[in-house]
Image: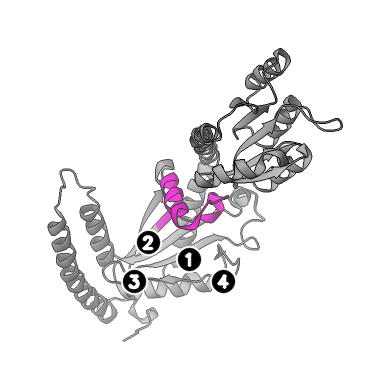
Amino acid sequence: MEHSNTILLIDDSYTKFIDGLSAVGKSHGFSIQAFASVREGIEFLDENQNLVGAVLLDLSFTPNNFEGLAALQEIKKSNALIPVLMLTGNQSEKEMALAVECMRSGAFNYVVKTNFDPVSLFLMLKVAISQYDENTERERHSTLKEEYRSCIANYEKMMQTTEMILLNIFNGKLMFQPTFEGRLKEFKSFYDKIKSKEQKEGFIANPFQRFSDLVGLRVVFYNAADMLKAIEILQSATDFVDMKTGKELVADDKGKEYGYRAVHFDVVLNKNKRLHLEEYQSLKAIPCEVQFKTIFAHSWSKVYHALSYKESEGMNLTEAEQEQLGEDFKKAAKNLESIEKDITTLCEKYHPNRKVIPNDN
């Protein structure tokens, strides 16, 4: 997470130097939000945690205000990691002793107001904010990893429960029982996805609620008719509801996309059907991404993904080879789609259970 170059200045005499400080700050890409009151400054920080990159805090205040050390401690209660630079009025023994005490209590550094160089100050602030970004990212990584470890067992249980339910509701209703592939996203992949999304969308506060694919279940069918029937069965059942709406399942149909061709559902257990039972209560609001594919589309995407993303050992394609790979797989996709139609037609013609399968031709 990268913090803004907004500096929170808390100093009851800030009006004496704010104009010059703001002008120099602006030339270095900084903006300053100033308050004479410590309480008002901390209220602003509480409401703008992602906006403020650092705090400039006066060491001494007028009566009925916080002294610098107490103010620093209050700021650190609000945000333990934010860098705070103390502003001292002079270099007296008392002021220096207080400044050192503030450093011991978590201040990033101190600056003497009577002789400081604004340019040097903002260079110091850049270093402080950069370190703040690193520390915040490190702490967030650690926090999310711990949360992942604490909840991953429930996600795995949700994957197994989803497979069990699908097996039950499909039983005897399809020509061929599909194959199931469960996938539990490793923490690194989960975290990398968060960072990738944040580059486009900005900070994501609750990634475990934001993403539905921490755990997924791929259901592979041997013909397209079985897959269509399974979609109908799943949507008419009441075991699951849509993760986002809490209502009937809505399919994310990618069935017409070149090569990939799949249908997705982001499901959670229906509280009225399952969650009242004790064995399911730990799965409340745990999502599972269910993906329906034919074996032909599955083969295409599995191999294409491995080759195009260099997952196969020893792959080192040039840019021209990558382009040719894409063209070759387009041709392969058309051939597989043709075979899929032929196989589906044969199943509908000869399989004993063909009459339960709707013919969409």
Q: In the rendered image, is residue 171 in sight?
A: no
Is there a contact, CB below 8 Å, between mark 4 and mark 2? Answer: no
Disc on res. 4: none
Name which residue lies at 64% across and 60% down.
271
- Image location (x, y in percent) of residue 242: 55, 66
Circle 2: element type: strand
- Name the residue at the bottom extreme: 361
Determine which residue is flagged by label 1.
Answer: 169
Q: Residues within 10 Å of mark 1 (few under 14, many from 20)?
A: some
Q: Earlier in the sequence, mark 2 or mark 1?
A: 1
Vertical position of residue 249 compared to residue 58: above or below: below
Circle 1: element type: helix
The boundaries of the magenta stretch are 190-217
Q: Kindly report the distance in space between the C-alpha atoms of the residues bearing marks 2 and 3.
A: 15 Å
Disc on res. 248: 4
Q: Earlier in the sequence, mark 2 or mark 3?
A: 3
Disc on res. 175: 3
Q: Nearer the viewer, mark 2 or mark 1?
A: 2
- Asked where in the image residue 37 lies, by quadrant, the reply is top right
Vertical position of residue 170 compared to residue 228: above or below: above
Residue flagged by tag 4: what amino acid is it? Glu
- Image location (x, y in percent) of residue 2: 50, 44
Q: Earlier in the sequence, mark 4 or mark 2?
A: 2
Q: Residues within 10 Å of mark 4 (few under 14, many from 20)?
A: some
Q: Earlier in the sequence, mark 1 or mark 3?
A: 1
Q: Nearer the viewer, mark 4 or mark 2?
A: 4
Name which residue lies at 82% across and 31% down.
62
Name which residue lies at 71% across and 18% down.
95
